[in-house]
Image (cartoon, rainbow, N blue to C red):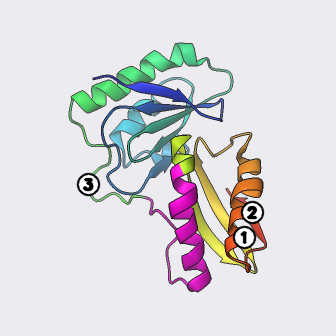
Amino acid sequence: MFIQTEATPNPATLKFLPGRIVMPAGTADFPSVETTQRSPLAQSLFGIAGVTGVFFGSDFVTVTKDGDQDWHVMKPAILGAIMEHFTAGKPIMIEGAPVAAASGDGEDDDIVVQIKELLDTRVRPAVAQDGGDIVFHSFQEGIVYLHMQGSCSGCPSSSATLKSGIENMLRHYIPEVVEVRAVL
């Protein structure tokens, strides 16, 4: 098994590509060790010193590290944990465990449907290339609230992505949108 790695715009995250499907549908975000009960792989990765976050995309795993740690020290252990997990045939997620939806839940009015469509078709594929995801949270009084995951969470360029990229695009296509904000 050969696992490729890619740098992301966030220096605290690294993207690992195992060459196979990680999440057949949706994504899974593990911002702390306490959130890993539903994933044996996330639990294993959090067992490595310095790991502070794990995110699963369709064909990648993004790992976030503590700022004091060095990728050259951590990377071999992370590669080993991912390789061991896949070669042993262990599940990524425990059966019946909830998986994050691609977008917010609930009934949607026409504006929310348009927002989600633009996010799904134009934004999410681009941020997935950088090892992250942006999930619709809500739309209230002209403000779109988005949850940033994976390498997007805490990324130094995430504010610019939200304001210059996503906000401008949504305002262009949907006049009712006046602002985009990140939710934690």
Front in this rendered view, residue 89 or 151: 151
User: Badge 3, how many Cα within 10 Å: few under 14, some, many 20+?
Assistant: few
| Residue at the extreme top | 73
Q: Quadrant of the C terminus?
A: bottom right
* SS category of the residue bearing label 2: helix
Residue type, mark 1 in image: His
User: Badge 1, how many Cα within 10 Å: few under 14, some, many 20+?
Assistant: few
Please state which of the two labelled residues, at mark 2 or mark 3, is closer to the viewer: 2
Residue type, mark 3 in image: Glu
Seen in the image, is 64 located left or right of residue 142?
A: left
Find disc 3 in the rendering and name its residue.
Answer: 95
Residue type, mark 2 in image: Asn
Q: Residue at x 51, y 63 (%)?
A: 120
Find disc 1 in the rendering and name its residue.
Answer: 172
- Residues marked 1 and 2 touching at CB (< 8 Å): yes
Which mark is on residue 168?
2
Q: Position of residue 100 (x, y in %)?
A: 45, 59
State the CA–CA distance, disc 3 to disc 1.
42 Å
Q: Position of residue 53 (x, y in %)?
A: 54, 38
State the CA–CA distance, disc 2 to disc 3.
40 Å
Q: Residue at x 41, y 57 (%)?
A: 26
Please state which of the two labelled residues, at mark 3 or mark 1, is closer to the viewer: 1
Q: Which label's residue is closer to the chain start, 2 or 3?
A: 3
* SS category of the residue bearing label 1: helix
Front in this rendered view, residue 78 or 20: 20
Q: Position of residue 15 (x, y in %)?
A: 50, 33
| Residue at the extreme front | 172
Q: Which residues are magenta?
A: 100-125
Asked if residue 114 lies in the magenta stretch, the reply is yes
Asked if residue 71 lies in the magenta stretch, the reply is no
